Image (spheres, helix red, strand yellow):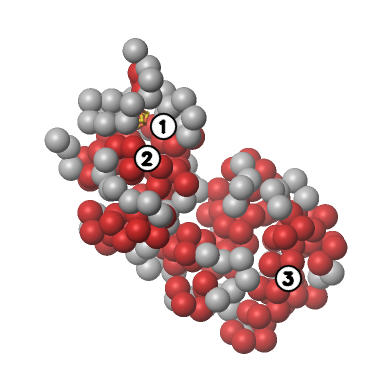
Amino acid sequence: MRTPREIVRIMARHLGDIGVPAPVSSGDDPFRILVGTMISLRTRDAVTRVVADRVLRRAPTPADMALMREEELAELLRPAGFYRVKAGQLSRIAAILVEKYGGKVPGNRRELTALPGVGPKTAAFVLGHAFGIPAVCVDVHVHRIANRIGMVNTKTPESTEIALRGLFPRREWTGLNHVFVRFGQKVCLPVRPRCRECPLREDCGYSSGEP
Ligand code: SF4
């Protein structure tokens, strides 16, 4: 039986060059990564990149965004999923960052998750990529694949996060999400996973119904 680290290495080798996560392509400034991460929720990577660029060109800082009308922000966000909800959340986040944090994004989980629309997944992504604080970002792909393979046996993303933290050294926590996400997009799809071409077929207890 392969170890979790070996399994992730096999996934990464199978995928080849996976580039950088879409929210990170907006730049490494914490505000840009936070905005990109909010936009990326329920939104395809290509759309995230285009929309994040457009929004951050118009409002590169929290102060700029706080001064925008929410309707204008919604128009810029429009191709992204739930763009009206995201416009409201980003407007309020920008105002809070200006009023409470001197225009900076706080670099800890408690304050990040107190921001509108920022859950554990977004907070972990921002901590890892914007602040260099190791964090396991568990989204639907990570939760699904880790359970299918049998790496964890959990019911919620929160418990998956705790379990994965115990299986990998801290320095590898931040990079896990991107490998799982790409693997979940290309091989271990939510419906009809491509088990026949999967390099983990021998290790995986999931029954895909394939011959
Ligand atoms: S064998 Fe199938 S279910 Fe298991 S990891 Fe591979 S694609 Fe996913």
Q: Residue at x 40, y 42 (%)?
A: 144
Name the amino acid, label 2.
Answer: Ile
User: Does the numbered disc 1 mark a residue whose Cβ is under 8 Å from ligand 1?
Assistant: yes
> In what element is the residue under mark 1?
loop
Residue occupied by mark 1: 188
Q: Which mark is residue 145?
A: 2
Q: Nearer the viewer, residue 154 or 19?
A: 154
Which-is-in-front pick, marks 3 and 2?
A: 2
Q: Are marks 2 and 1 in contact (CB under 8 Å)?
A: yes
Which badge, 1 or 3, is on the more N-terminal residue? 3
**Residue flagged by tag 3: what amino acid is it?**
Ser
Q: Are marks 1 and 3 in contact (CB under 8 Å)?
A: no
Which of the 4 image quarters holds residue 149?
Answer: top left
* Label disc, if present, on residue 149 of the rendered structure: none
Q: Is residue 186 visible?
A: no
Quarter placement of the C terminus: top left
**Residue shown at 37%/40% (left/top)?**
145
Report which residue position mark 3 lands on: 91
Coordinates of residue 105 in the picture (x, y in percent): 56, 75
Picture quadrant where residue 96 is located: bottom right
